[in-house]
Image: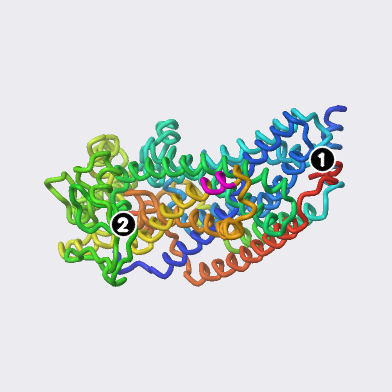
Amino acid sequence: MSKLKSIALFYINGFRTMPRWARMVWIIILVKLFIMFFVLKLFFFPNILKKNFDTDEERANFVIEQITRN
Amino acid sequence: MLENIDFTLIDWSRAQFALTAMFHWVFVPLTLGLGFMNAFTETVYYKTGNPEWKKLTKFWMKLFGINFACGVATGLILEFEFGTNWAAYSWFVGDIFGAPLAIEGIFAFFMESTFVAVMFFGWDKVSKKFHLASTWLTAIGANISALWILVANGWMQNPVGTAFNPDTARNEMTNFWDVLLSGTAVNKFIHSTTFGFVLAAVVVIGVSSWYLLKKRELLFAKRSIVVAAVFGLISSIALIVTGDTSAKNVVKTQPMKLAAMEALYDGSENAPLVAFGILGGSETHKNINANSRENFVFKIEMPGMLSFLAHGDFKTFVAGIKDLVLGNESQGIMSYSEKIRRGHIAAQTLVAYKDAKLNNPDGEEFRMLKAKFEDETFMNDYFAYFGYAPYYDENPDVLQQNAFKLVPPISLTFYSFHLMVILGFYFILFFVVVLVLIFKNKYHNKCWLLWVSLISIPLVYIGGQAGWIVAEVGRQPWAIQDLLPVVTAVSKIDASSVMITFTLFAVVFIALFIAEIMILLKQIKTGPKIEEETSNV
């Protein structure tokens, strides 16, 4: 338990004593992840096969249709 | 089928993917190389206890951290695009992509949350030995993390170790080691990582040269340059060697790419290598047909060298674009028209299989068709050309015209390849000159060379992007070599939505890039600080 506590403290102290540039970098990471997962993924990048079909068999049939169109 | 394809959609989908991948590749190589440089310099600090080496390590580690943070997770956007813009493709590749990317994701998560944290937060909090081990493991981990995505890319260039399952319409891994250790994957990994080492070395020398130009941090800059120049020279030689083995691999697995790299229309024995050339008439290289001829405004050739580099023998035959499209019986090269016919038969068989399974899964026809997909001869002689099927036409003239549509963009591939090679050799010369002068203690007096070093930073990034253009544009129209062209791999969605996301990406990426550059420049201007020793990073 004390080992876990010291690991947690290591991270907490690390974040607390971060210099200014590192805080900026963390802001960039968080903004980037927000844009990626809550804007891009949610509104612009649905998984077409998961969204449009219920079973793997339907997905496989659709893909065969796509790749064999002539 | 080709007349029904919306090429606007394909072009925008490809442009979007290229933009994302190229942006990702701005950050990755510096992380790959700078990680090892940090490990080297910290090892010197560990051995000597000299605080100057700690200062040096912490400074470059800071730049590593900024670059790492700006680049982290940008690769994930590629996975979003797979699911939306390349849905058929992502299904067709099956677990070939899933397994390596899952390993990469798990690996990266554990690496980043443990070793990177110790590297930045652990100064004076963990033992010197443990800190050094974390720095080394971060460097090794970053490179191993890159391995998996490069293996997946290697499989797209040379799909081995898998079998197609007609029931699931997916490729299934039959031999993990064949996928991991294919010549294409191994070369791609070593070539890409050694490029990362060269890039990091050039960046370190460039930034250090700026300090020398400003007459500050002299000892720090000279020490950084010595480490970077040695690391860079060894890496740049390895880069050229792996470039050579990559090209030899391309000859076997993607001969059309090699022909495009050299703008070689007609193959020959004793084939010359174009050391430098300017292509003539851009339209000639766009609308290629049976009458197309080599067209250079100017070129410097090395006789027989292409044959030698391709096969290790000056007299061997190297196939040109027309040999590959039209076939060359004497050299045992099958024409693209024949490959298209075979691909068409494979596609028809798959359609018949699907129909038979739906209508009468217990019938004789279904059993016969199923047997075909288990028959090695059918898979090797027909299904191996499955991706050529969309180019089929009953009219032989149209079919031959379609065959020429399988030629990649010549000008872009040719120029990117030559730019990459010229820069590759330039960097060897650059590191040699820097090393010689730094050991003679004359480097810091050569103002022109300090500027050259600084200007070399954008050049090395251009070289890396050119390399990926050769790898990816040179293999068009394939999403997966011979099995899936981009015309069928792309999702049939509204082209305008792809244009919107492309624009959105461009804006976000530019903003991120500007943010990184600003933070980096500020830290470089501030310079290394000995007093930072007591605080984090």
Q: Residue at x 66, y 45 (%)?
A: B224
Given the image, on which type of amino acid does mark 2 rest?
Ala
Q: Three-letter amino acid code at disc 1?
A: Tyr
Indicate which label's residue lies in the foreground, 1 or 2: 2
- Does the residue at mark 1 contact the one at mark 2 (Cβ under 8 Å)? no
Instruction: Quickly name the residue at label 1.
Output: A11
Foreground pick, B74 / B204:
B204
Label 1 neighbour load within 10 Å: few <14, some 14-19, many 20+? some
| Magenta stretch, residue numbers | B432-437
Q: Position of residue B305 (x, y in %)?
A: 27, 47
Label 2 packing within 10 angstroms: few (<14), some (14-19), many (20+): many
Q: Is residue B435 magenta?
A: yes
Position of the C terminus of chain B by quadrant: top right
The chain letter for the residue carrying disc 2 is B
In what element is the residue under mark 2? helix
Q: Is residue A29 visible?
A: yes
Q: Position of residue B343 (x, y in %)?
A: 25, 50
Q: In this rendering, would A26 be left or right of B67?
A: right
Mark 1 residue element: helix
Identify the image quadrant of residue B373: top left
Which residue is disc 2 drawn over? B260
- Kindly give the residue lying farthest to the left in the view shown: B330
Mark 1 belongs to which subunit? A
Q: Is residue A69 magenta?
A: no
Q: Residue at x 41, y 38 (%)?
A: B172
In the rendered image, the vertical position of residue B123 relative to residue B522, given as above or below: above
